[in-house]
Each structure stands twice: as C-alpha cells, then as structure tokens.
Amino acid sequence: MTMLRDSSTLTRRILLHWRQRPVSVLLGLLFPVLLVLMFGYLFGGAMAVPDGDYIAFLIPGMLAMTMLFGLDAMVVAVTTDAAKGITERIRSMPVSGIAVLAGRCWADLLNAVVGLVVMIAAGLAMGWRPEHGIGSTLAALGLLLWLRFALVWIGIWLGLLLKTPEAAVSVQVLVWPIGFVSSAFVSPDTMPGWLGAIADWNPLSATATAIRGLFGNPTWASHTWAADHAVLLALAWPVVLTAIFLPLAWRQYRFLAR
Amino acid sequence: MAYGEDGIRARGLVKRFGGATVLDGFDLRVGSGTVCGLLGPNGAGKTTAVRILTTLIRPDAGEVRVAGQDAIRQPRQVRYRIGLVGQNASVDEILTGRQNLEMFGRLGGLGARTARRRAGELLARFGLDEAAGRSVAGYSGGQRRRLDLAASLILTPQVIFLDEPTTGLDPAARIEVWARIRELADTGTTVLLTTQYLEEADRLADRIALLDAGRIVAEGTPDELKAKVGPDRVETITRKPTLDEVFLRLTGHETTVGAAR
C-alpha cells in the first residue's frame, strides 16, 4: 500500500515537472515530429519503397524510435537526481527502493503514451493510417509500450551506473546508431549483409516490423526468420531485456548503500 | 551499556572504500537534545560518518543507534526519525518550494492534507512564504538552504544531521541559518553538525568531536577542548586558545598555528 502511494507521489512529481516546464516538454515531444517530417519529406523522395508509400512505412518505425528516445531521457533523469542530491534525500527517508524505481517506471510510461499520441497525430496529418481496425491498433500500441517498459530498466541501470549527467551524454550519442541500425527507417535488406543481420535482430526492428503488420502498413519485408516472427520477437525481446536489466537496475540501486 | 533514547551512539565504525580506510574505529555519542559539532580537516571522514549515521551507506564494522533504533538492522525505523541536510541543497529545482515540501511530506508518509499544512507551516517559519510558489531554480543560495532545512524537518525528526550546512553561503545567509539551527536545538532536537568553520562549531555546538584520519581524537565542550591545549601559550596577552589552535594541535598540523589567525 505505502509502496503504491510512494510510487504515485514520485510519478506526480514528474507530472508537476511538465506543468512547471511546459516549453521543454513540448520541445521534447516535437523533436521526433521534426525528425519524421525530415525523413518523410526530405529523404522520403529518395527512398525507393516497393509499393511506393514511404510515409506508411516510416511512421511505425518512428513510433518505435520514439520508444527508444525514452532511454536517454531516463538516464538523464536518474543521473540528474543523483547529482542534485535528491536521490540521497529520498534514500534517507522511509521510502522503499522498489517504490522509487516503480515511480520512475510509471512516470516514464505516461511520458511514452503522450509521446505516442503526438507522433500518431503527426502521422495522421501526414496521411498515415492504421488499416486493420481498433483491436490491431491497440495491440500495436501495447507492443510499443511493452518495449518501452523493458527500456526503462536499461535506462535506470545505466543512470545509476554512470552517476553523472555528463556521462549520460554518451548514452544520447549511442542511442542513434542503435536506432538507425534497425528497420525503423529503411529495410535491413538495403544494408551490407553483416549490418543487415544485426539490424534484423535489433529488438527495435522486431517491434517496428510487428506493428507494421498490425497496422496493415507495408513491411518492406525481407523473408528472414526474424522478420517472419516479428510479433513473437516483439513480445519476447522485452521479456529478455527486462529479465536481465530489472535485476541489474535493482542491484545497482542497492549498491548505492556500499 | 545503555544507549541514549533519542541521541546518536556509534561504536567502532570502520568503512573502507577500495583500499582506503576512511573510518577506522569511529566512536561517537551525542546526548539527546544536544548539538554536537563534528570537526575535522578535509578527508577526515566527516561525510562518510554522516552517511553511515543516516543509513545511506553501511559500515564494514561497528554498531550504530540513532533515535533509539538500530541504523544497520532497522534503517527504515531510523529514517522515520531523522532529517538530513546534505552538502548540496537536495531539493527538486524544477518544482516550487511548496511542491517540494509537500512531495517530501508525502514520501515521509504524511497524508495529503497533513503534508499541505506542514509545508505551509515550514514555509512561514523559514521566511519562504513569498518564494513558495516559485520554481526553486530561481532561489538565492540562502533561500535554497532554508528550503533544504525545511524539507529535512517535514517529518518533525528527533535527530537532524547537517553536513556543512553553511558552506558556500554569504555571511548574512550563514548567520540566518545559524539562528535556525539554534532554534531547532532549543526545541529539543538532537543535532549533529559537520563543519570546517570553527567559529560555527564554537557558536552552535554544546559539544565538539574532533575527527582526524577516521577516528575521534578529542571530544568535549568547546571550553574543555580549549583547556586541553592549556593556557601555556607564549603570548603577551592572556587569552584562551582559540578553537583554531585546538583544531590544529589535535589534528597534528600545529606548525601553522598563528599563521592561521
């Protein structure tokens, strides 16, 4: 009970941040939109998609990419709290560590929902449509948030490991290659073989390909095992990542007492 | 041996980081309702001691009781009874002063209404009424410190720990914070204060513990400590040795006495 209350207090804190800093929140939300406009209209013309509609291919990829951007935001949030002494203050109070981590998780998932709403609105404005009805659409959104849930734990773990906001910048840099070596923007088919194989097995690709199927958007599918079993992988990858990184995040939190 | 009801009792604390022994048999006793100044040169282990006493880190050996509770085995029980003011003002910069206090109150287990009332009381008491609705990012150093102090008091702690509470403050803000600490002590709160400013310890502390290389090397009232160094200073005017001299003598850096004044 107290755990639920504490984690909701910490979630509320993040919502208050939004209210206090609407401009920076807005910029954070608009950044992926800017990106999608750039890819859709600047590079989109040069993208030779088999059935011609790059926007329909791009939007699901960008939705997956938006999930990935949560990772560096989380690392920045965790390291900033450590640097400002907030982590210490909370740890000196009767709050369970589980509540602290759960609060971060809920706040981030809320953040992700808002990010998805904005990106979907941008997609709809650009002419993208989910073609397979409400059930499939909700399933696709569920897969996206499921991926984000796993990324939360990687973010918390990295944040606790790196300690300082300066070090967190390295994660911001690393997020880009992870995002691009995937099927988010182009088919792995078009990459050199070894790179395509990595992109093919990237958890981000699994989610992107799976939700393209669920939305009824072109998948530009190369018939690899990973692409053919995208939904299975989109379910399984987050399980694997969470199984690894949730315990690591918890362990790192406990290490603060060393 | 009986432990103090509300005070602090640490015995034989040892803490190593990697190969370095930061605390090496640290013993300290702070009576309930008194103010203890923990003095020591940089690197003596003051912050490490405070971090152990406030349950933030675990010692490699030793026993700690704070406010009658075992800080190693029952950290949560201790956390209900203590307040901590760390070296940097540990409040959320984006939130307002009021939002900060309400949040920490809620985290400490207060109901929404109680947290709101308590936050209001503390804001008034610390002269932050006007600033209460503004984001902390725009606060002055002194305002931030006072908010930090208020946040540590949100649960009405029995014991409060202040780790260099006036470092980085201008003299006026420092005197203001001193007055607040004095008030706390007068209401019966046990206070442990670390500082590098000897005047600060002399003004605020009932008793002083001198920490050097991870051990308490002397303990007593400021007058007792001054008497320890003795009246046999070679000076033309009779005066008690200053705390600076006590400090330098007992920590073994005596050569600079005089130059420090």
Image: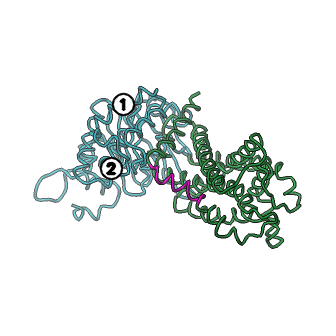
Chain colours: A green, B cyan
Residue linked to disc 2: B139
Kindly state the secondary structure of the residue where label 2 is placed.
loop
| Of B28 and A213, the residue lying toward us | A213
Q: Position of residue A225 (x, y in %)?
A: 89, 58
Q: What secondary structure is the magenta-colored segment mainly?
A: helix
Residue B4 left/right relative to A237: left
Vertical comparison of A37 with A20: above or below: below
Q: Residue B67 occupies which quadrant of the picture?
A: top left
Counting labels gives: 2
Vertical comparison of B219 with A185: above or below: above
Residue at 52% in and 41% down: B62
Residue range corresponding to the magenta coloring: A21-33
Q: CA distance from mark 1 to mark 2?
A: 34 Å
The amino acid marked with disc number 2 is Tyr
Residue B132 left/right relative to B63: left
The amino acid marked with disc number 1 is Ser
Kindly state the secondary structure of the residue where label 1 is placed.
loop
Disc sitting over residue B32 in the figure:
1
Q: Is residue A25 magenta?
A: yes
Local packing at callout 1 (Cα closer than 10 Å; few below 14, some 14-19, many 20+) is many
- Give the mark, 1 or 2, whose residue is nearer the N terminus: 1
What subunit carries mark 2?
B
Q: Position of residue A211 (x, y in %)?
A: 76, 51
Vertical comparison of A2 with A171: above or below: above
Q: Residue B59 occupies which quadrant of the picture?
A: top right
